[in-house]
Amino acid sequence: MFGFTRTRRAGVVAAIAVGATLVISGCTAGGGNAPGGDGGDGDGGDVSITMLPKNLGNPYFDTSSSGAEEAVEEFGGSFEEVGPSEASPTSQVQYIQTAAQQGASALIVSANDPEAICDALDEARSADVKVVTFDSDTNPECRDLFINQATSEGIAKVQVDLIAEQIGDAGQIAVLSASANATNQNAWIELMEAELAASHPDIELVEVVYGDDDDQTSFDKTAALLQTYPDLKGIVSPTTVGIAAAARYLSTSDFKGKVALTGLGTPNQMREYVEDGTVTAFALWNPADLGYLAAFAAQALVSGDITGAEGDSFEAGKLGSYEVGADGAVLLGDPYVFDAENIGDFDF
């Protein structure tokens, strides 16, 4: 089962939404403002960008696509978003093939699987389609660039900094994680422990518990932590399911306003808890900026300003200059902090 496509010719004609059962790929994102760009009138004409998230109808990816479209509007091309209705390892293959057949200049892909779409991407690249991954990478040899939202070190540090600020840099804290074998969670927690030991000697991490990315389990684990540690000052939950469940528990408990909660969450999940004072601030990357950067990276590849080699640099509009790192990775930057002042500006 396939999703619909949304085609917008940015800066040229009004947006056109196209519903379809199969994918109609291919758009254009021209080279107006980036170095060496020509507004799409020379050196190969307009650049067409096709955005392929893991699935359509996901607010997170809706936001990243809106950022990519904003970038395309700035450099004067056209933009299309396509994708399956459900995320599965091979569900993106047909969209990649169609985009290549219809002559897309570049694909921006959040991969459902690091290997399952590689053959299709290789075929697209052999047809001179530039491939930029974002959010979720493929194997490096299957694409030209990967736009990485944040490093593990950055994700760990921002959470430690937030909880330290909220509890006065002293007291007991706990971590509410996803599953015990979650690779990314465990990496972040290990780095958080190192950051606490190095820079926050008066904060004691008393326990790491696992909610298995299940709402009710995470809710119950929050309750158990607060019962087990009556002097607990804060909870860090580096998982969107966990932080929302913990906030739900705290919001109606006697601990509201007394026990700090931070971690990684989305604005739509956490808005009510920020507005009612349960949560002061939490972090995540800004998916709109992620899509915006990916589009400018794609434009730079298509225009020939960069090849994707380590040390290449390009301009990304309002975000400034970026450099390609090892394995063709470009780092967006530090995670974004959401609080009462800015949370109303986001919808994902």
Image (spheres, rainbow, N blue to C red):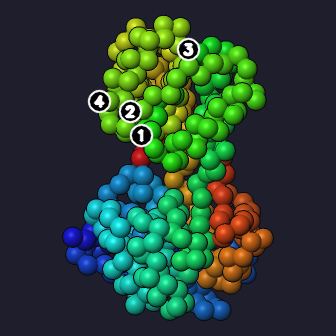
Residue at 56% x, 58% y is 290
Q: Position of residue 37 (x, y in %)?
A: 68, 80
Q: Which residue is mark 4?
A: 216
Q: Amino acid at mark 4?
A: Gln
Q: Which callout, 4 or 1, points to the residue nearer the camera?
A: 1
Asked if the residues shown at circle 3 and circle 2 are in contact, with their CB atoms under 8 angstroms apart, the answer is: no
In this picture, residue 334 sits left or right of residue 233: right
**Nearer the N terminus, badge 3 or badge 4?**
4
In this picture, residue 312 sits left or right of residue 335: right
Eyeballing the image, is 301 above or below 250? below
Secondary structure state at the residue bearing disc 1: loop
**Camera-nearest residue between 54 and 215:** 215
Secondary structure state at the residue bearing disc 4: helix
In this picture, residue 99 sits left or right of residue 263: left
Q: Which callout, 1 or 3, points to the residue nearer the camera?
A: 1
Label disc, if present, on residue 179 of the rendered structure: 1
Eyeballing the image, is 59 above or below 262? below
Residue at 53% x, 8% y is 231
Q: Which residue is mark 3?
A: 233
Residue 156 sits in which quadrant?
top right
User: Is residue 193 visible in this depiction of the protein?
Assistant: yes
**Nearer the N terminus, badge 3 or badge 2?**
2
Eyeballing the image, is 64 above or below 284? below
**Nearer the N terminus, badge 4 or badge 1?**
1
Question: In the image as oriented, which residue stretches furthest toward the right?
Answer: 311
